[in-house]
Amino acid sequence: MCGIVGYIGSRQAAPIILDGLSKLEYRGYDSAGMAVFDGEHIQIRKAVGRLKVLENLTHGGETMKGYMGIGHTRWATHGAPNNMNSHPHLNTAQTIAVVHNGIIENYIPLKKKLMDKGYQFVSETDTEVLAHLLDYYYKDNPLEAITKVLHRVEGSYALGILFADHPEEIYAVRKDSPLIAGVSAEGCFIASDVPAILKYTRTVYYVDNQEVVKLGKDGMKFYSVDEEEITKEAVRIDWDADAAEKAGYEHFMLKEMYEQPKTVTDTISPRIRDDKIVIEELKMTDEELAAVKKLHIVACGSAYHAGVTGKYVIEGLARVPVEVDVASEFRYRNPILEEDSLVIVISQSGETADTLAAMRESQARGFKVLGIVNVVGSSIAREADACLYTWAGPEIAVATTKAYSAQLAALYLLAIKLGVVRKTIHEENASELIRDLRRLPDQIELLLGQKGKIQRFANRYVGAKDIFFIGRGIDYAISLEGSLKLKEISYVHSEAYAAGELKHGTISLIEEGTLVVAVSTQPKLYQKMISNIVEVKARGAFVMAVTNEENKAMEKASDYCVYLPETNPYFANSLAIIPLQLFGYYVAVGKGCDVDKPRNLAKSVTVE
Ligand code: F6R
């Protein structure tokens, strides 16, 4: 979802900007553009489609000479992806250039006012309003113009701004959209995310909401919206740029699936001490935790699916009621949050607009929010009252795999911890659960070893029209995620159903040969699932079962079986997801889809 990079320093800006934008490709985009100050004028180049097109157009940036510039990858919201709507946007005199990630919610009245004053617009975007509004307020003092604009606009933004008559400075500012700034001996940088500038510097500042940064060749200064200078601490980034590369795998998604054993280990190990779950980051005593009467889990997409699993596991182990909501629904449904409720938001990116808004809504009502977040220093991580990091490292493929697995692991930790403090789990049960938790990484590894088998099976379904996923209880939660993985990357229509619900309508879609993936990991529900399988097979379905080794009856009941190693039923989702991820991945590969960057999708959904 829109990426921003800016540079000012002793090197040519355009190649650095292009390189930085390429590291933000994972965010999703459909056009790209750059503005570089050539010593006299602001030069602009834009291109629709992949960043490669902009690279070719500018010969890798060579044809745009200059030591300061800003660049942008655009994920279209207001207006189609075309050169008019692509960023950077300019004022009419072409002396101010702006790149923007986010949405200016009151752009229509602002646009009208500016038009009444004679400003002419050339694009359909909300961003162009900013260029003209800056022009309107600009009287030789960029900082003053920017802060005046900030007082007028509503919505979310991370902005990079150039002023032609201040050729020694770049300005940047953010509200609710991610932005970092970096400094090196060769100049200063802004970017939407750390990987964009990691090649050049490891000294990074996380820009806070409504802070303005002035970047020069030799350093940067931070200001509040009242134009007062503020002091900020730099953060040293110690993770490796290589972690964000493919390391020989055909796709980031495959690499990330293979990183899942490590991800789960990294998420659970630091929180198990002497056979006990210790989650210091919760910032809650055992007594406070035991006093929690209800949990509200709020998230989007796969993170929401992790939350659905979390509900089953937490309610089962800790006997505390859990409500799970899609963030975009939660924030507008005026939810009833009772006293002693704890809100948990789950997010890989930590920047998902709806999740962030749901968190703030809960905090505004006086509730504590625990974030389960992957991206260190992201907005949710910083603003949550407590943050439990999922140590999955940078996830590049748009379709989440390893971060999802880490989210499940974090929720299991929480469930056991809650169970222990609420005394719904005895000590020896807790030890057994912890033992099973520790075995998950090796078991995931084992399942990843079955990729050849799953690939051969998936190849039979590259032409499929519809695929259904069914399961009961916790297996319904994993069906939701399996179905999403398949459809988002392979574009095969798919639905997930609670198995018992299928016959209330959807079963009419089953035709001769329709694939139904039946997940059955819960011993107490084996027999019920077999009945559902019989129902769909009677209508012509071909059934792939994902079940436990002990469930021998499934061999006969289904057409194709994938067996999972034995674990505690509460943790089965962590194993069942592996064949489902591999299946979705290989259907997409078989169809020749752009697996890491599926159409219409963005890695980080920073708009509502
Ligand atoms: C699907 C996927 C998305 C995200 C969702 C939330 O593979 O990745 O459904 O899970 O957009 O994103 P985060 O976790 O960054 O809040």
Image (tube, grey):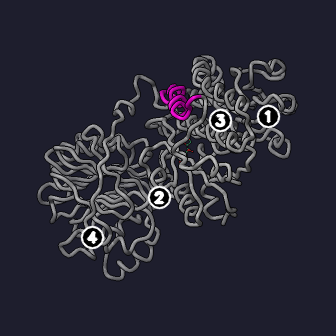
Main secondary structure found in the magenta portion = helix
Q: From the image, state whether disc 2 or disc 4 is nearer to you.
A: 4
| Residue assigned mark 4 | 227
Q: From the image, state whether disc 1 or disc 4 is nearer to you.
A: 4
With 62 as the anchor, is 333 left or right in this view? Answer: right
Question: How far apart in space, not on screen, are marks 3 and 1 (Cα)?
Answer: 21 Å
Q: Amino acid at mark 3?
A: Gly
N-terminal label among 3 and 1: 3
N-terminal label among 1 and 4: 4
Element class at badge 2: loop
Count of numbered circles in the view: 4
N-terminal label among 1 and 2: 2
- Ligand 1 quadrant assignment: top right
| Residue assigned mark 1 | 511
N-terminal label among 2 and 4: 2
**CB of mark 3 within 8 Å of CB of mark 1?**
no
With 159 as the anchor, is 341 left or right in this view? Answer: right
N-terminal label among 2 and 3: 2
Q: From the image, state whether disc 4 or disc 3 is nearer to you.
A: 4
Element class at badge 3: helix
Q: From the image, state whether disc 3 or disc 1 is nearer to you.
A: 3
